[in-house]
């Protein structure tokens, strides 16, 4: 029977990513609820147990636990973040609220190279995302790794094969994270016991089973997810049973509707229909400022348009399933597992979609994959590299890149925080903006203020990253740090007038985004291939002379669950800023560069 490494889910944002990494290391892994019984684990032939992170606190009344008999299975157990704290709590140690919050990179010092830290360097960068911390160890445990703000960052009990790490080894930001998991796979005796190459074959069978006797009406965007879903569904069911609908919602980038239609047709998706519903979307979005409400309206309008097209085509709803290119980050960020905290509602996870899923009328062949895995499947299906390598673009489009506001959202103690930031980092001026954006901190959604740093000197990206991490970890009122690239010194007080999704603002961002894409494409530099996505954001703040702020948000990522801000050459950033300012004179008040990693900031601002 197949050996299985089980990931017990405590509501982590990264829980599925752990299983993904284990599979890549050649071992089979499944995610099960945190309260799975020992009997069920034995039936799965569990050779190792990983306890995921999660948004709760182990010492609170609503803290999640597990079957304590798991510790007696005589198989390796690894706790990550919340899981690390849980095993300490259950086995007699203590966990308390930390005085220092850690969100971002920390340097791990190795005290003992053994167990999951075998073959480790003396020092390594790890990714932290926690508030609680372990303050004393259970009997039989020892600390084998530590950081400046987390004394018991890695612990182990060799005799019982129990290990705990406060950081996240599953994210790419942890330099030797795969080595931690590889060591654990070795300890479980599961090396080279499974391969991911058979995904397409297995998924084709699942699609044929679910869609038995039915056809699929697929919403396509031209992005890699829906395009790969289109190709996979066609492979399983044939072209005649898969109907693609591309909806132009009026929130696309400049000329994108024509580009997407051409690209999809060139890829051989001939059973494709295009509907311009931009007027309908903008009407439904009138006077809506709240980001969650915007996402819900966009998701529901997609369904309205799909239903209208289906009616026009006289399609029998009993004969059709609704297909989506949903991938795992969409699910987990919407709180799609039992105890996960909602970060933001994705357009493909609105309530009506959830109802259709319950009724068995939704098919999502990629829902358990990450972006990098989707790309691999697309290549296996023969899609062009142009389509596979296309930068991700959110389903709600510019709707989540155009911040809306009913007026200024002023942080009451902004001046006090700004002064403290300047005292700690005297090389900068600081200005907190009277708007908010969505972030993710400690597996929770945050909706907090960004702070802008001003510097007359050319920035050092590494030092800026450390500064941004320290600011957000120190001031819980903030979840993003920006660098002003258009002005070297602090601007006048920011003003925010009521602003919504209207044609003029959409056009402004389309033009700014087109300029960024044009300049970026024309340049040749070594870091270019590292930029996974380059959102451009419109923020309704002016500084005494009208206009709005443009935010540049290039990111480096593999799977969208974590991301680093992109380190573009400073000359290129200045060139982009000047070109935007010159071409959009009078419409742009300032240009900022987002230097926030994910976490604590999400890739998109809303």
Image (cartoon, grey):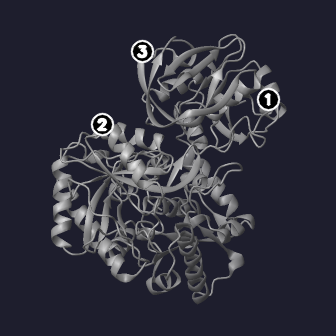
User: Circle 1 sits in a helix, a strand or a loop, which is it?
Assistant: helix
Instruction: State the separation of the CA atoms marked 3 and 2.
Output: 21 Å
Q: Position of residue 95 (x, y in %)?
A: 67, 28
**Residue position marked by numbered label 2 in the rendering:** 462
Nearest the viewer among 97 and 412 is 412
Residue in the picture at 56% in, 57% down? 330
Dot 2 and dot 1 residues touching (CB under 8 Å):
no
Is residue 174 among the parts visible in the rendering? yes
Query: Looking at the picture, does residue 407 appear above or below residue 471?
Result: below
Question: Label 2 vs label 1: CA separation?
Answer: 47 Å
Image quarter in which the N terminus is found:
top right
Q: Which label was assigned to residue 469?
A: none
Which of the labelled discs sits on residue 122, or is there none? 3
At a point 69% along the width and 58% down the height, the residue shown is: 209
Q: Nearer the viewer, mark 3 or mark 1?
A: 3
Q: Which mark is residue 42?
A: 1
For image coordinates 56% across by 35% down, the residue present is 23
Q: Is residue 21 above or below residue 380?
A: above
| Mark 3 burial class by Cα count in 10 Å: few <14, some 14-19, many 20+ | few
| Residue at 30% across, 36% down | 462
Q: Is residue 282 above or below residue 342?
A: below
Residue 343 occupies which quadrant of the picture?
bottom right
Going from N to C along the chain, the mark reached first, 3 or 2, is 3
Asked whether disc 3 touches disc 2, contact meaning CB atoms under 8 Å apart, the reply is no
């Amino acid at each position: 029977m197949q050996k299985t490494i089980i990931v017990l889910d405590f509501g982590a944002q990264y829980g599925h990513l752990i299983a993904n990494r284990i599979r890549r290391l050649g071992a089979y892994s499944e995610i099960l609820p945190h309260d799975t019984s020992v009997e069920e684990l034995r039936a799965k032939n569990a050779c190792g147990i990983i306890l995921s992170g999660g948004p709760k606190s182990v010492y609170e009344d609503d803290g999640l636990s597990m079957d304590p008999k798991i510790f007696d299975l005589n198989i390796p157990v690894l706790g990550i973040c919340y899981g690390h704290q849980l095993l300490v709590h259950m086995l007699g140690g203590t966990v308390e609220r930390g005085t220092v919050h850690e969100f971002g990179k920390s340097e791990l010092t190795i005290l003992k190279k053994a167990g999951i830290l075998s073959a480790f360097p003396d020092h390594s960068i790890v990714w932290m995302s926690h508030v609680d911390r372990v303050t004393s160890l259970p009997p039989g445990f020892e600390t084998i790794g530590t950081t400046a703000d987390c004394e018991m960052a890695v612990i182990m009990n060799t005799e019982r094969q129990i290990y705990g790490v406060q950081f996240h080894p599953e994210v790419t930001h942890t330099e030797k994270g795969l080595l931690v998991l590889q060591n654990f796979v070795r300890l479980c005796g599961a090396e080279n016991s499974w391969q991911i190459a058979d995904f397409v074959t297995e998924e084709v069978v699942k699609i044929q089973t679910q869609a038995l006797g039915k056809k699929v009406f697929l919403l396509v965007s031209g992005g890699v997810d829906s395009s790969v879903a289109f190709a996979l569904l066609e492979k399983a069911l044939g072209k005649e049973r898969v109907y693609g609908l591309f909806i132009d919602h009026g929130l696309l980038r400049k000329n994108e509707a024509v580009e997407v239609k051409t690209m999809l047709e060139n890829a051989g998706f001939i059973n494709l229909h295009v509907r311009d519903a931009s007027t309908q979307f903008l009407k439904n979005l009138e006077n809506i400022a709240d980001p969650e409400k915007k996402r819900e309206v966009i998701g529901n309008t997609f369904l309205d348009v799909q239903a209208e097209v289906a009616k026009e085509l006289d399609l029998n709803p009993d004969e059709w399933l609704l297909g989506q290119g949903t991938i795992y980050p969409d699910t987990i960020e919407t709180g799609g597992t039992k105890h996960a905290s909602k970060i933001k509602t994705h357009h493909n996870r609105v309530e009506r979609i959830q109802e259709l899923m319950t009724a068995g009328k939704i098919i999502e062949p990629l829902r358990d994959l990450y972006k990098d895995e989707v790309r691999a499947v697309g290549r296996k299906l023969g899609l062009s590299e142009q389509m596979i390598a296309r930068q991700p673009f959110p389903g709600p489009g510019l709707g989540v890149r155009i911040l809306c506001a009913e007026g200024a959202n002023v942080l009451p103690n902004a001046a006090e925080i700004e002064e403290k930031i300047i005292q700690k980092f005297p090389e900068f001026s600081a200005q907190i903006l009277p708007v908010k954006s969505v972030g993710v901190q400690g597996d929770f959604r945050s909706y907090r203020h960004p702070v802008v740093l001003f510097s007359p000197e050319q920035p050092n990206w590494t030092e800026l990253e450390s500064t941004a991490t320290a600011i957000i970890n120190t001031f819980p009122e903030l979840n993003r740090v920006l660098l002003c690239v258009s002005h070297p010194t602090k601007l006048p007080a920011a003003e925010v007038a009521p602003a919504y999704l209207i044609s003029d603002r959409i056009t402004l961002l389309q033009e700014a985004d087109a300029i960024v894409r044009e300049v970026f494409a024309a340049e040749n530099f070594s870091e270019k291939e590292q930029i996974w996505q380059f959102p451009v954001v419109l923020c309704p703040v002016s500084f005494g002379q009208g206009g709005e702020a443009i935010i540049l948000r290039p990111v480096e990522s593999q799977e969208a669950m974590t991301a680093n801000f992109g380190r573009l050459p400073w000359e290129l950033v200045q060139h982009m800023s000047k070109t935007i300012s010159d071409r959009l004179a009078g419409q742009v008040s300032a240009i900022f560069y987002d230097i926030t990693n994910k976490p604590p900031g999400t890739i998109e601002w809303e």
